[in-house]
Image: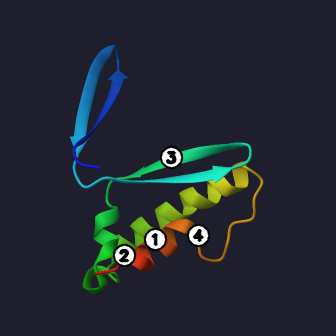
Amino acid sequence: IKKAIIKYEKNGTRKSYGFARAYYMEVRFKAGSVFFYFKGLYRLLYKERMNNHYNKILFSMFTDLEKQVYEFYGKKYPEQGPLTKWILKNLK
């Protein structure tokens, strides 16, 4: 997705911001589906940047979010979630 715009309201004032290089992923279950929009995911797609502290924290936040969605729908989180598989497939 290029130049996604997020609109929100804060204290009665409408605001919006855009972000570039956004990625989205959909996780489907029988009971419903969830879309994730990832803003900093491109940082995890480079092998040489993979092992710094910021990227490790970012990756753990994304996987925690995935685990919460799986728990919400009552499913067991796989050993390698869809996000991890996608990152490994698209590493540069």
N-terminal of the pair, mark 4 or mark 2, is 4
Mark 3, secondary structure of its residue: strand
Residue at 69% across / 66% down in the picture? 77
The residue pinned by badge 4 equals: 81
- Quadrant into which the C terminus falls: bottom left
Residue 19 appears left or right of 35: left
Residue at 35% across / 18% down in the picture? 11
Measured Cα–Cα span from mark 3 to mark 1:
15 Å
The residue pinned by badge 3 equals: 35
N-terminal of the pair, mark 4 or mark 1, is 4
Q: Nearer the viewer, mark 4 or mark 2?
A: 2
Residue 86 appears left or right of 54: right
Label disc, if present, on residue 90 of the rendered structure: 2
- Amino acid type of the residue tagged 1 in the rendering: Trp
Q: Position of residue 8 (x, y in %)?
A: 35, 26
Q: Looking at the image, do the residues carrying marks 3 and 1 touch, with CB atoms under 8 Å apart?
A: no
Which residue is nearer to you in this view: 9 or 85? Answer: 85
Residue at 46% across / 71% down in the picture? 86
